[in-house]
């Protein structure tokens, strides 16, 4: 697990793999905007893999985003992640 520290690191957890191009792209876009997140590699963490499968109809789809309000998004565009984090910050 790696923590990309900022105000949002507690608000966003990304479930990823090292080889997923969609994961890499989303992380790059979030990093460019200095949006923090906690990253968990589902291949290294069986509990995380089970969680991802539980919110994706039994499929291990990455990236899966988990927000601090308990909602999830599967393979979300960076713009959607930014909008959701702004909504959480205003709540």
Image (cartoon, rainbow, N blue to C red):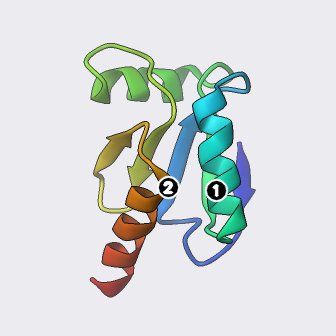
82 shown above or below 73:
below
Question: Is disc 1 placed on a helix, strand or loop?
Answer: helix
Camera-side residue of 7 and 35: 35
The reply, left or right, for residue 83 in relation to residue 40 is left
- In the rendered view, does 21 fall on the left or right side of 75? right
Across and down, in percent, residue 37 comes to 60, 58
- Badge 1 or badge 2: first in the primary sequence: 1
Q: Are marks 1 and 2 in contact (CB under 8 Å)?
A: yes
Mark 2 falls on what kind of element? Answer: helix
Question: How crowded is the residue under tag 1: few (<14 C-alpha within 10 Å), some, or many (20+)?
Answer: some
* Residue 78 numbered tag: 2
Q: Residue at x 63, y 65 (%)?
A: 36
**Mark 2 closeness class: few <14, some 14–19, many ≥20 residues within 10 Å:** some
Q: In percent of the image, x 39 and y 77: which residue is there?
A: 86
Instruction: Give the CA separation, mark 1 to mark 2.
Output: 6 Å
The answer to whether residue 22 is above or below residue 26 is: above
Q: How many marks?
A: 2
**Residue under the point 34% across and 74% down:** 88
Q: Which residue is mark 1?
A: 29
């Amino acid at each position: 697990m790696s923590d990309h520290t900022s105000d949002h690191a507690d608000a966003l957890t990304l479930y990823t793999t090292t080889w997923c191009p969609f994961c890499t792209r989303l992380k790059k876009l979030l990093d460019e905007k200095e949006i923090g997140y906690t990253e968990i590699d589902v291949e290294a963490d069986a509990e995380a893999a089970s969680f991802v499968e539980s919110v994706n109809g039994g499929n291990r789809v990455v990236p899966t985003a988990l927000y601090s309000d308990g909602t999830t998004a599967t393979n979300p565009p960076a713009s959607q992640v930014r909008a959701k984090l702004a909504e959480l910050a205003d709540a």
